[in-house]
Every structure is written in structure tokens, then in C-alpha cells.
């Protein structure tokens, strides 16, 4: 049996959710247990299978964390490895050590993940919604697109109470309570003023569109 | 996106008992049994080439056939071994010695005894029969190997497809040499090495996609 001469992976580091990575034992310490769990899982023992998957997930996460920077990529890789193990669990020979079987699958899937990411990065540009929406220049001229200038003029023409209400409630996005405290108006008065202001603005804009 | 603990829950819930794979040598023997069955059936239906007795007295021909069959056997064994995750890729080298002997004997034959294609040497009927042997040998063997190694799609699809195709190509080539009168050197080259290169190239190029088509989900 060549297992004893096999090259072991580097020291295991368990990466837990939201916790600082901590040192853990060599995988060899768990290998026998994992091997027994897999043998039982192949026979349909779900408890053993859960124990196995719960046990190997942190180990695979540690392996992935060494190769990938982005945390979501690490989790994607872990899930990919777990799915592969599920699909090919019948290929594990219980007479052989579990570690090399697991590490080969994990490495294989991580390489595939990195290749997929590399291909995606080569042909895709990350979309930044604050920057640009579509390529025609008209779509990126905010003033014209939202007709902001006309709207600001319409707000300026509102009576002072309504103007103040619309500024605080819609432009500054204050809550009713905050706006009431700031302006000294009652909440009911603010609601009425905002409602009337919106009505007046709708009329202004509708009239402008008709011209 | 599903979280890892949720994924584990789903995998555990969907886990059914699975039948452990038999040792790779046993599985390779099953495939080889099929390969020899195809060869025997073709021999019964088509018959050996007309000059088989004379040919079997030529050492180069015998070594070439033996080397191609050995390449087929060793490549099949290597593909079943390498398809398992924890086995070394060094096993890929298993068919290399016999492959070298096979290619060398064909090359030696070409260099020492070049037989030109005679007028009327290419007959449409014989070419069609050669093509039929090619299809009847390579298609069932490729499909059988594809099915038996489908789990390799998630692990080493291209390597396994390439070495598996070599096994199919070697048996196809042996069948063509045994059952058809390929006397002209160009015909030997085309129907032996040409077909082998074609099958291995197709296997290497399409192996990943084809395996993922039949892969376990």
C-alpha cells in the first residue's frame, strides 16, 4: 500500500464562519474516521455522511482559502467540492486512504473554479451601476435623463410650506419625525404639505409635457 | 446563493446507498472482454483477410498486431486506473512502450518495403467495408468506455478520454489489419495510424464535453 509514502498536504488550518482561522490537527488524525464515515455513507448511513461532510468542509475551506482571495469564491469552491464528492462517492475504495482521494478531488475542482474565473474575467467587465448604464451618451446625462432641471424649477415655484416639506421628505429623505422636529410642523401638517406639493408638481410636469 | 450548511443538509437528505466501484483491473477486463467479443463477431461476419496465413509468417506484421493489441489492453487498463481520483497520473505511461513498438513496426514497414498503390488499388467497395469495420469497432467500444468512465467527467475528463481513445484506436487498427487487405503502404498508414490519430484527437478534443453529457449529476 502506497499510502504511507504519500506526500501529506500542508498543516491543516480550519477556517470557520466569521471566526479567525485557527490551527488544527493534521488531516491524518481525521482520515481514519472520515474513511469509516465514507464507507458507511456508501451503504446509506446518513448520520455518518453528515459527520463526514461537516468534518471535511472546514478542511476543504482551508485548502480553498490558500488559493482564492474572495470569500464568496472560497465558499463556491467548497460547495463545488462537496457536490463532486457526492457525485463520485462510489469511486472511493475503503481499502485505500481517504486523504489523497479527497485532496485530489478538491484540487481538481479548485483548478476548474480558478479557470472558470479566469475565463470570465477575460471576457467580462464588471458592471458598476454608478458609472454608466448604457453606451449611448444620452443615457448617461443625468440632467436630461431625469429632467432634473425642470423638476427643480417646479419645486422652486411651490408655496414655501410645500417646498420645505418636499425638500425634507423627498430630497433629504428625512423621516416624518425628523422632518417635524426640524421644521417645527406637526406630522399631520407635513403629510398634507407633502401630498399637496406632489400633486402640484405632477400638474406642473404634465403641463410641461403637453407643450 | 445556498449556504454550505444548507447544501450539506440537502446532500445528506438525498444520499442513497451507492454500489462501490469494482477494482479498476476488473472493470478494464470487462471492457476488454467486450472489445474481444466485437473482434470475434467481426471475424465471424467478415472473415480474416485473404492473405492472413502469409502475413502471419511475417514478423513485422505479427509484432505490429501484437503491439497494437497490447497498446489497446494497456491503454484500457490505464484509463480505468487514472479515472479514479486518488491514482497517480504516471499510469498514463503504461501503454507507451507498446505504442512505441506499434508505431515503430509500421514505420519500419514503410521504410523497408514501400508498396505503392497499384492501378485500381483503391476500390470503393473495400474502402466502404474498411469504414464499416472502423465504425463497428470504434463506436460500441467508445460508447461502452464513455458509460463505464462517466464519473471521470468531474475529475480528469480530457486525460481519461485521450487514453481511452487510444485503447479504442488500437483495437480498431488491429481489426482493420486483420480483416482487410491493406497491402499498399499508404493504405496501411491511413487505416492504421491515420485512424488512430483521428480517434485519439477526437477523444482529446471532445472528451470533456462528451463526458459531461453522460456525467452523474
Image: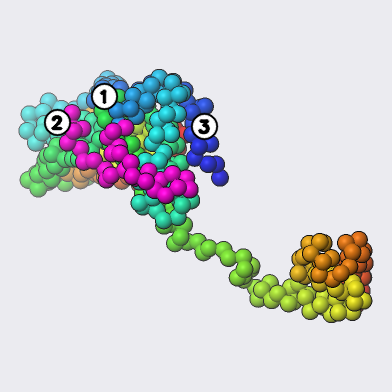
CA separation, marks 2 and 1?
35 Å
Disc 2 sits on a residue from what chain? B
Which residue is label 3 attached to?
A: B9
Residue stretch in magenta:
A1-30
With respect to residue A118, does B55 lie above or below? above
The label nearer to you, 3 versus 2, is 3
Disc 3 sits on a residue from what chain? B
Circle 1 crowding by C-alpha within 10 Å: few under 14, some 14–19, many from 20: few
User: Residue A131, how many percent across, how many down?
Assistant: 60, 70
Callout 3 secondary element:
helix
User: Residue B157, how many percent across, how many down?
Assistant: 35, 41
Q: What residue is at 44 percent from the left and 62 percent from the top?
A: A122
Is residue B130 at all visible to an observer of this figure? no
Which residue is nearer to you in this view: B156 or B203?
B156
Callout 1 secondary element:
loop
Which residue is label 1 attached to?
A: A95
The label nearer to you, 1 versus 3, is 3
Is residue B50 at all visible to an observer of this figure? yes
Question: Number of labelled discs?
Answer: 3
Q: What residue is at 69 percent from the left and 76 percent from the top?
A: A141
Which residue is label 2 attached to?
A: B66
With respect to residue A37, does A203 lie above or below? below
User: Residue B192, how many percent across, how many down?
Assistant: 22, 40
Q: What residue is at 79 percent from the left and 64 percent from the top?
A: A178
CA separation, marks 1 and 3?
27 Å
Q: What residue is at 43 percent from the left and 21 percent from the top?
A: A45
User: Residue B118, how many percent across, how many down?
Assistant: 19, 44
Amino acid at each position: 500500500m502506497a499510502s504511507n509514502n504519500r506526500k501529506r498536504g500542508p498543516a491543516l488550518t480550519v477556517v470557520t464562519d466569521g471566526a479567525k482561522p485557527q490551527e488544527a490537527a493534521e488531516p491524518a488524525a481525521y482520515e481514519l474516521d472520515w474513511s469509516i464515515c465514507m464507507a458507511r455513507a456508501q451503504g446509506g448511513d446518513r448520520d455518518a455522511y453528515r459527520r463526514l461532510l461537516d468534518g471535511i468542509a472546514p478542511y476543504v475551506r482551508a485548502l480553498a482559502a490558500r488559493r482564492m482571495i474572495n470569500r464568496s469564491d472560497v465558499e463556491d469552491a467548497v460547495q463545488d467540492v462537496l457536490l463532486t464528492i457526492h457525485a463520485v462517492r462510489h469511486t472511493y475504495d475503503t481499502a485505500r486512504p481517504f486523504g489523497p482521494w479527497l485532496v485530489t478531488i478538491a484540487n481538481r475542482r479548485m483548478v476548474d473554479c480558478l479557470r472558470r474565473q479566469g475565463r470570465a474575467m477575460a471576457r467580462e467587465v464588471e458592471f458598476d451601476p454608478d458609472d454608466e448604464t448604457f453606451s449611448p451618451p444620452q443615457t448617461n446625462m443625468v440632467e436630461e435623463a431625469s429632467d432634473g432641471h425642470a423638476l427643480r424649477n417646479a419645486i422652486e415655484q411651490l408655496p414655501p410650506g410645500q417646498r420645505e416639506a418636499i425638500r425634507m421628505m423627498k430630497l433629504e429623505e428625512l423621516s416624518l419625525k425628523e422632518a417635524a422636529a426640524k421644521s417645527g410642523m406637526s406630522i399631520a401638517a407635513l403629510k398634507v404639505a407633502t401630498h399637496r406639493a406632489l400633486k402640484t408638481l405632477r400638474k406642473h410636469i404634465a403641463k410641461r409635457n403637453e407643450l | 446563493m445556498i449556504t454550505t450548511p444548507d447544501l450539506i443538509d440537502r446532500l445528506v437528505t438525498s444520499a442513497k446507498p451507492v454500489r462501490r466501484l469494482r477494482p479498476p483491473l476488473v472493470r478494464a477486463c470487462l471492457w476488454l472482454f467486450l472489445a474481444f467479443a466485437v473482434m470475434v463477431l467481426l471475424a465471424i461476419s467478415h472473415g480474416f483477410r485473404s492473405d492472413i496465413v502469409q502475413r502471419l509468417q511475417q514478423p513485422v506484421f505479427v509484432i505490429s498486431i501484437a503491439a497494437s493489441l497490447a497498446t489497446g489492453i494497456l491503454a484500457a487498463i490505464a484509463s480505468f486506473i487514472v479515472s479514479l481520483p486518488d491514482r497517480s497520473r504516471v499510469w498514463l505511461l503504461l501503454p507507451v512502450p507498446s505504442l512505441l513498438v506499434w508505431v515503430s513496426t509500421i514505420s519500419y514497414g514503410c521504410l523497408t518495403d514501400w508498396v505503392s498503390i497499384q492501378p485500381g488499388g483503391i476500390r470503393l467497395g473495400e474502402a466502404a467495408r474498411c469504414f464499416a469495420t472502423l465504425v463497428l469497432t470504434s463506436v460500441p467500444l467508445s460508447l461502452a468506455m464513455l458509460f463505464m468512465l462517466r464519473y471521470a467527467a468531474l475529475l480528469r475528463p480530457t486525460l481519461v478520454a485521450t487514453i481511452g481513445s487510444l485503447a479504442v484506436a488500437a483495437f480498431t487498427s488491429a481489426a482493420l489489419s486483420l480483416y482487410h487487405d491493406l497491402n499498399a503502404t499508404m493504405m496501411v498508414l491511413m487505416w492504421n495510424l491515420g485512424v488512430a490519430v483521428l480517434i485519439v484527437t477526437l477523444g482529446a478534443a471532445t472528451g470533456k464535453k462528451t463526458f459531461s453529457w453522460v456525467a452523474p449529476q
